Image (tube, rainbow, N blue to C red):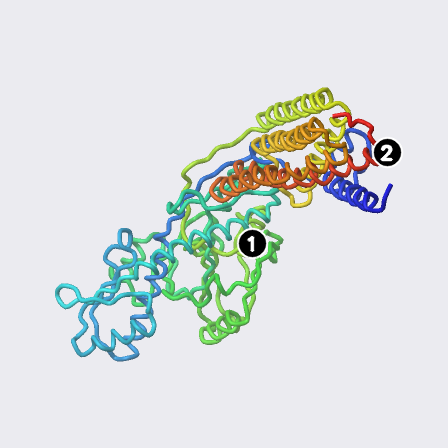
């Protein structure tokens, strides 16, 4: 055997071993069951095979727009007061229908320039225009509004992904769904507690620390009556838990500061823990900037009360005995250990930028997955055996060449899936079967070309050389066009369709290697062992 053939054989053996490791890793045992267990650990099953939960979520993007315009209102009030510009009212007349629209009333013509300067300097994403009755209207620029909505969807996807990853779900699908509809597709293979996941996904979990100005009151009406029916300036009314010593589920109402001292973005970490009574709690730490702000706030309000607010509800009320820098906790007798873990995880992953609405929910049972696996594997095995037998019968000894290439093709494909952690779905199994068919097609093109050259009187070495040389262009052409089609399916398809596209694409790339490189090497090895003029069995 010449050196050229030796290094090609060595390369094929190395590739075979590398991809066998990708399929099985280091199995605990080499029995049939041991190898099967090792393979299932390396190759993940998709939702349609393993069972699990399928959700389609609608991101309420107007929530993100409202949050931005609320901030703009506060900036306007602060800057106009700072510039000593008088105004009678700044409000959003239609927060639901036009959340990006802000109306200012009572600004004089002299103050109009100061308002214009404020908008251009601090609120460049808004357009300023004049309205009826000497009003001024701020409206978010269309491009900025569209970017804000798309950004809300992107941030929601990342937040949901962080929360799902902490559950240890194998290869979840979390991606945008529906073009321009602000929807998210979530598929969780193997998940057996969809209600818990829905709660984790939907929870906004915005953590804030606000000054408690007054309360508690038994009801919202009682609180407003105590203030003469007028909301105190720079205050809002918020529901919460009752004071210590009363049942935890008893509701109370508090007046708290409109502007929080600490926001969720100031959170550095949150962990489940226990309080001084041994009850489950959540301990949180603040960033350096947030901690300094918290220290300044507590230093200026020693002896007063602060409230820990979670999802617009006062969870804890405590007296400030001394300045606090960067640590706090949330506790309560009704909180379970699992709820403490979930809350800490939600806080760590960040708050959703907008609310979530469930449009569709489906649960796929594992029995359906088992049936699909058996049917798919049975079809793949039967199809593979039929192809192998056909190649042996039709092409005689050369059929062994084709069968070896096909088996190696399948090993490379499965090994690749094991290495990258690709998800095997039912369409993915179809992709494997189609890959086998494409591999046969490549071998048929080469073998028929070799037969034609032999019929034209060429010697076996020349016929093999001409067969591979002429068939090569056709094989590359068919594979490239199919790969382009698979790429389009991957870009615009959802999870199962993408699984089909991935297996098909890499299977075709593996087929180029096995049908051309490996098959040619086997032919060269066979020819090297034949006498000059001896016929080629094909």
Describe residue 211's horizontal placement relative to residue 516 as left or right. Answer: left
Q: Is residue 128 above or below residue 240?
A: below
Residue 347 relative to residue 419: left or right: left
Q: Quadrant of the C terminus?
A: top right
Q: Position of residue 273 (x, y in %)?
A: 61, 55
Q: Could you give the CA–CA distance between mark 2 and mark 1, rounded to whole angstroms?
A: 70 Å
Looking at the picture, how far across and down is residue 508, in whole percent? Answer: 62, 38
Q: Is residue 39 visible?
A: no
Q: Which residue is mark 2?
A: 529
Identify which residue, 277 or 122, lies in the foreground: 122
Q: Nearer the viewer, residue 53 or 406?
A: 406
Helix, strand or loop at disc 1?
A: helix
Say which residue appears at 38% left-offset and 54% top-offset: 149
Percent of width and height locating residue 33? 77, 29
Task: Name the residue furthest top.
Answer: 393
Element type where label 2 sits in the image: loop
Total label count? 2
Q: Quadrant of the N terminus?
A: top right
Q: Is residue 394 something one can see in this rendering?
A: yes
Above or below, 432 against 350 in this view is above
Choose the circle earlier in sequence order: 2 or 1: 1
188, above or below 231, in the image: above
Q: Vertical placement of 119 versus 419: above or below?
A: below
Residue at the farthest left position: 133
> Which label number is shown at residue 157?
none
Please tell me the numbered disc located at residue 344. Answer: 1
The part of the image, by quadrant, that contains residue 424 is top right
Q: Are marks 2 and 1 in contact (CB under 8 Å)?
A: no
Q: Residues within 10 Å of mark 1 (few under 14, many from 20)?
A: many
């Amino acid at each position: 055997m010449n050196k050229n053939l030796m290094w090609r054989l060595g390369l094929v053996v190395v590739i075979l071993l590398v991809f066998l490791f990708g399929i099985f890793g280091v199995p605990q045992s080499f029995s049939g069951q041991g190898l099967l267990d090792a393979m299932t650990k390396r190759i993940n099953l998709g939702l349609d095979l393993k069972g699990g939960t399928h959700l389609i979520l609608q991101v309420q993007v107007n929530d993100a727009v409202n949050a931005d315009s609320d901030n703009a209102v506060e900036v306007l009030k602060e800057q106009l007061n700072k510039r000593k510009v008088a105004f009678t009212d700044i409000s959003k007349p239609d927060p639901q229908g036009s959340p990006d629209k802000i109306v200012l009333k009572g600004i004089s013509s002299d103050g109009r320039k100061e308002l214009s300067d404020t908008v251009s300097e601090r609120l460049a994403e808004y357009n300023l225009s004049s309205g009826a009755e000497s009003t001024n209207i701020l409206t978010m620029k269309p491009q900025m509004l569209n970017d804000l909505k798309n950004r809300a969807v992107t941030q929601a996807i990342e937040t949901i992904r962080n929360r799902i990853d902490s559950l240890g779900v194998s290869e979840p699908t979390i991606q945008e769904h529906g073009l321009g509809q602000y929807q998210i597709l979530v598929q969780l293979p193997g998940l057996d507690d969809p209600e818990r996941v829905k709660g984790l996904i939907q929870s906004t979990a915005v953590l804030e620390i606000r000054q408690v100005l007054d309360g508690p009151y038994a009801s919202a009406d009682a609180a407003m009556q105590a203030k003469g029916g007028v909301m105190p300036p720079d205050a809002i009314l918020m529901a919460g838990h009752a004071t210590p010593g009363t049942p935890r589920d008893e509701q109370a109402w508090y007046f708290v500061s409109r502007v929080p001292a600490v926001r969720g973005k100031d959170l550095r970490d949150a962990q489940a823990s226990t309080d001084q009574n041994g009850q489950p709690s959540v301990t949180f730490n603040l960033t350096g900037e947030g901690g300094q702000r918290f220290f300044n706030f507590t230093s200026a309000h020693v002896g007063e009360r602060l409230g820990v607010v979670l999802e617009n509800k006062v969870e804890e009320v405590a007296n400030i005995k001394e300045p606090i820098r960067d640590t706090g906790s949330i506790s309560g007798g009704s909180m379970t250990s699992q709820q403490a873990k979930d809350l800490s995880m939600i806080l760590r992953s960040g708050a959703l930028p907008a609310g979530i609405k469930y449009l569709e929910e489906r649960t796929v049972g594992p029995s359906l997955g088992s049936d699909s696996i058996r049917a798919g594997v049975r079809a793949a095995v039967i199809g593979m055996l039929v192809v192998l037998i056909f190649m042996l019968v039709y092409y005689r000894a050369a059929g062994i060449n084709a069968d070896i290439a096909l088996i190696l093709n399948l090993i490379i494909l499965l090994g690749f899936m094991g290495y990258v952690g690709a998800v095997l779905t039912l369409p993915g199994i179809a992709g494997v079967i189609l890959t086998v068919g494409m591999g046969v097609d490549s071998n048929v093109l080469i073998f028929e070309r070799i037969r034609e050259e032999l019929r034209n009187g060429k010697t076996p070495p020349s016929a093999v050389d001409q067969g591979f040389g002429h068939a090569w262009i056709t094989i590359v052409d068919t594979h490239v066009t199919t790969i382009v089609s698979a790429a389009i399916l991957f870009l615009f398809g959802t999870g199962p369709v993408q699984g089909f596209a991935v297996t098909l694409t890499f299977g075709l790339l593996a087929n180029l290697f096995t049908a051309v490189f490996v098959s040619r090497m086997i032919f060269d090895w066979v020819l090297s062992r034949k006498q000059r003029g001896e016929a080629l069995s094909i």
